[in-house]
Each structure stands twice: as structure tokens, then as C-alpha cells.
Image (cartoon, grey):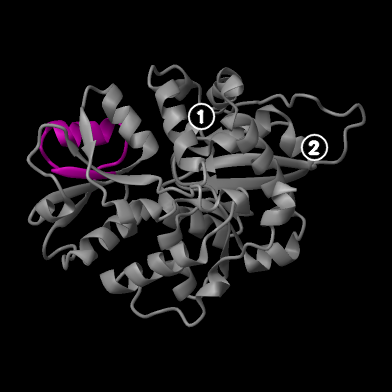
Amino acid sequence: MNTRTLSRRSFGKLAAGSVAAAAIGMPAIVRAQTAITFAVPNPSALTWLPYWVAVGEGYFADEGLEPTLEAIDGSSAVLQAMSAGQAQIGAPGPGPTLGARSRGVDVKFLYNLYPKSVFGLLVKADSNFQTPADLKGTVIGVGTADGAEVSFTSAIMSELGMSAGTDFTFLPVGDGGTAAVAFLRDEVNSYAGAVSDAAILAARGLELREITPEQFLGFFGNGIAMLESQMAAMPDLAPKFGRALVRGTRFALDPANKETALMHCAAGNPQEGEQDYAPSLFDGVVNRMTPTDAFIAEGFGFQPPEHWQAIHDSAVASGALSAPLPDLSAVYTNEFVAGWNA
């Protein structure tokens, strides 16, 4: 099975090179493989750890799938790629998913990849900012203007009665090295970033401190989504893709498999694999992908309805949604969870 990793750029454009990941344990008789494109909002292979483990261990091949991962610019671009038919499946954040659904896009969230929030609100360790309330009148750095980190941070600030453009300013500064430069130049006072961003910034010599309120750590992060029309066209894709991801997750969460899992991720993003922060980023991703005690029995991929309600209500309160959705349950489904975890 061949899988290409596409660098961050507009969807539909190929990167300079491709990565071939050999499947382990292929059956003697090779079955027909269904080629699909999986769109994700950033190029970090470790962020999509179960995917790359599933590629490297041959779990997708076992399901008859030949996926290509395409990393593009933020959750909105992922949803656009799916809507344009350039990706059959994607990994948007819940906030942009709600926004797309409110605009009539038939997107449905299937798999909760990050049951603990993938995002955090970060400040310099030696700054005077202790809580989000201290960020009034400041500039908050984000990766992209319409990424999931924006809706996540807007929900936090809305709880405090603050809104973007009035009480604080969002400034898109990219991720990784460009975000580090923005911090060093004091262009931003804080940064709303993912687990991968925090690890990269630390590797750049920036000692950071998280000030995310505890109640927002339950706001789950990116997950797997499909258009309902695509689900009807390819009814086997969600069950097969999810089964491979669950197998990849279980493999990665076993401490004995850490080095092998890191190797699989390095095949997906060789440059990241060479970085000294890769092992610590791996640990952070594993932590955020491990369900809390309250939901571990539900299985990998489970989406707590009460968490969806909290994310939805915060989006309405912050203005990210102009009005409540008439049927929040239509946005997501847990129908495949039992089969994935069987």
C-alpha cells in the first residue's frame, strides 16, 4: 500500500515529494484496494498518530483501503476539500464542523480522535498573564484565521464577556517556527495552539505555560468526519477507516510500541521525525488521545453528547454560530463506535 504525505498548501496541489509506507503483514493474496484521500488541517504526522501507525502496520490494507493523506491549511480548508469531492474523509475540528453544518454542508462528525482538548492557551512562562481574563486588550496568536483553535479560544473568552475585535485581537501567525518568531518579536502575547505547536515552540527555546481553564480541557479536538452524501456513496468507508484507526490507537498506546510508532510517523513526516521534540510530542498526543475515566468504557472514537452541547452553546454565545442549530444530534453520530472497538 502506498501512501503519500502532502505538505501544507492549497488542497489539490501535490507536494514536492511523496512518502511510500510499506504495509507490514500483507496477506499472501493481495485484495483490491480502494484509493481514498484523507484531508487533515496540519502536516504533523504525530498529530495523526493512529493513522500513520495503521499505515505502517498494514491495518488499512487489511481493510482493503489505500489512503493518501493530504495536509492543508486548517479545518475550513479540510471541509472545503471534502465538499469539493477532493477528499472522501477528513479531520476537522468540532467548531468549524458546526459552522459548516449551519451553512447547509451535510458534514457529520464520526470519530472523536482527541477526547481531551487538542488545543491549549499558552503564554510565556515568565509573563504576568495568569488566566485568560488577563488577556483583555492583548493579541492572541492563532495558526489560521478560521481554524478550530479560533472557535476554541473564542468560547473561552466569551465566557468572560469578551469578544474578538473589541476586547482582544486574533492574529494568524502560522504554527511551529513562525509562531515562535511572533512570540520572540512580541507580536503576540499568547498563542492558541495544538499539542504539536507547544512541543515545537518548546524545542525553539520558548518556555511556555498553559492557562486554559479546566472546564475547557473537556472540549474535544479534531476528529474524523465525512459528508453524509459521501457516506451514502461509500457505506463501507467509515466502518473500515475507524477500525483501522482503533487498531492504530491501541498499538500506539502500548508503551512497548513507542519506538515503532515513532518510526511509522517518521515515515509520514521525515523532517518531524528528525526533531528532538518528537518523543515528547508523542507522549503529549498519547495523553490527549486517551479517553478520560468517565468515557474509557465507551471505546475509542466516542463523542459525549454533553460535550457537543457545551461546544455548541459556547459557539452560539461567542457569535461563531449566529443561531442555535435546530438539531444538534444531526451533526455527529456514535453509531460506528461499537463496531470499531469490537
First of labels 1, 2 by sequence position: 1
| Residue named by callout 2 | 62
| Residue sticking out furthest to the right | 29
Between label 1 and label 2, give the one nearer the viewer: 2
| Residue named by callout 1 | 16
Residue 239 position within the rendered picture, expressed as x and y whole percent measured from the top left: 73, 53
Residue 6 position within the rendered picture, expressed as x and y whole percent measured from the top left: 53, 36
Q: Name the residue rendered at 54%, 38% in the picture.
A: 14
Residue 316 position within the rendered picture, expressed as x and y whole percent measured from the top left: 33, 74
Foreground residue among 212 and 328: 212
- Vertical position of residue 13 compared to residue 45: above or below: below
The amino acid pointed to by label 2 is Asp
Q: Does residue 141 show up?
A: yes
Q: Please tell me whether residue 183 belongs to the stretch shown in magenta.
A: yes
Foreground residue among 40 and 333: 333
Q: Is residue 41 left or right of residue 205?
A: right
